[in-house]
Image (cartoon, rainbow, N blue to C red):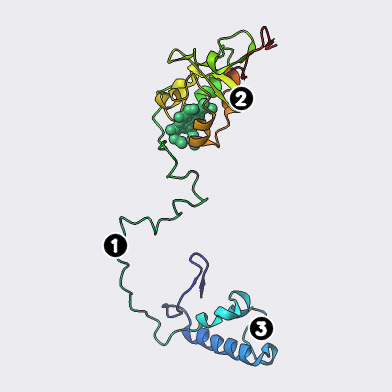
Amino acid sequence: MFNWLTGTQLPPAIPNLSLDDVEDEDEQTSSEEDTQQPSAQPSAQPTAPTRSSSLLHPSTAHAARPPSSPFKAPSAPNPPQAESTLNMFPALDSTQRASSTTAPSVARKKVPLAPGHSPLDWARLKSSNTDLRGVRQLDRYTLEDIAQHKTRNDVWMAIQGKVYNVTSYLKFHPGGAGQLMRGAGKDATDLFLTVHAWVNVDALLDKCLVGFLIKDKPPGTTTDLD
Ligand code: HEM
């Protein structure tokens, strides 16, 4: 019998199974394969596919044959490898991990958010008419400008060329205010992408956008919000 959960072949010596029938069928199947004349053999259920033809690759068909004893002595357990990462699944550097646990300098750790500061609360706040920008119009800012905003009461940061006032997001940040403050007053693009490249900053901070990062500021250039 083929176990679909584990992908392995079970020995047929399980109580309540018709062992004789199974063995007979195996013999027939084997005979069919040997002679390459499947239609020549009589079968109790001619329309039902045989296991070897339907489920097993011919090269593994021998695995379906019951061993001389259906019970296998338990093998010795693997030596303890508690310290080893060799047997970890997925492997540490596997692409199946959302983020490498060897990511430099930033350990992934969410913090409990204060009541009223869930992601849903943030979405509600954003869709209210509350001003989260603190500026009247979008503008262009240099790194020097942004560096003026790095206290907990007034935090700006640039991410991927856009400048955000994240002051109101501090208490909503799932990684904690302290982590968010690491990008305060800077171009935090690299830090942001190192920790969570999958986070959609445009969607989360759209109402916090204050402008765009530039190298040198041309005088008197602003973009109206309306
Ligand atoms: C730039 C400095 C930042 C640092 C150092 C930082 C750090 C972190 C850390 C350590 C976590 C928790 C662990 C994790 O889930 O990976 C986290 C989660 C998170 N951060 Fe940040 N963060 C920063 C900026 C931001 C910004 C600007 C946003 C908003 C767009 C943001 C949104 C999030 C979200 C949504 C999560 C939850 C991620 C998840 O559930 O997978 N972070 N952050």
Quick check: can you spot residue 73?
yes
Q: Disc 2 residue type?
A: Gly
Q: Nearer the viewer, residue 197 or 1?
A: 197
Q: Residue at x 46, y 45 (%)?
A: 100
Indicate left or right for 85 with 138 as reference. left
Q: Nearer the viewer, residue 46 or 225?
A: 225
| Distance from Cα at disc 2 to Cα at disc 3 | 69 Å
**Residue carrying label 2:** 161
Q: Disc 3 residue type?
A: Pro
- If you read the primary sequence from the N terminus, does the residue marked by circle 1 or circle 2 appear first? 1
Q: Residues within 10 Å of mark 1 (few under 14, many from 20)?
A: few
**Residue carrying label 3:** 46
- Which x, y percent locates residue 46? 66, 83
- If you read the primary sequence from the N terminus, does the residue marked by circle 3 or circle 1 appear first? 3
- Which x, y percent locates residue 108? 42, 37
Quadrant in the rendering for residue 54: bottom right
Q: Residues within 10 Å of mark 2 (few under 14, many from 20)?
A: some
| Distance from Cα at disc 1 to Cα at disc 2 | 50 Å
Q: Is ligand 1 closer than 8 angstroms to the Cβ of mark 1?
A: no
Q: Residue at x 51, y 68 (%)?
A: 7
Quick check: can you spot residue 50?
no
Indicate left or right for 173 with 127 as reference. left
**Residue carrying label 1:** 80
- If you read the primary sequence from the N terminus, does the residue marked by circle 2 or circle 3 appear first? 3
Quadrant in the rendering for residue 142: top right
Badge 1 element: loop
- Which x, y percent locates residue 223? 69, 12
> Disc 1, disc 2: CB below 8 Å?
no
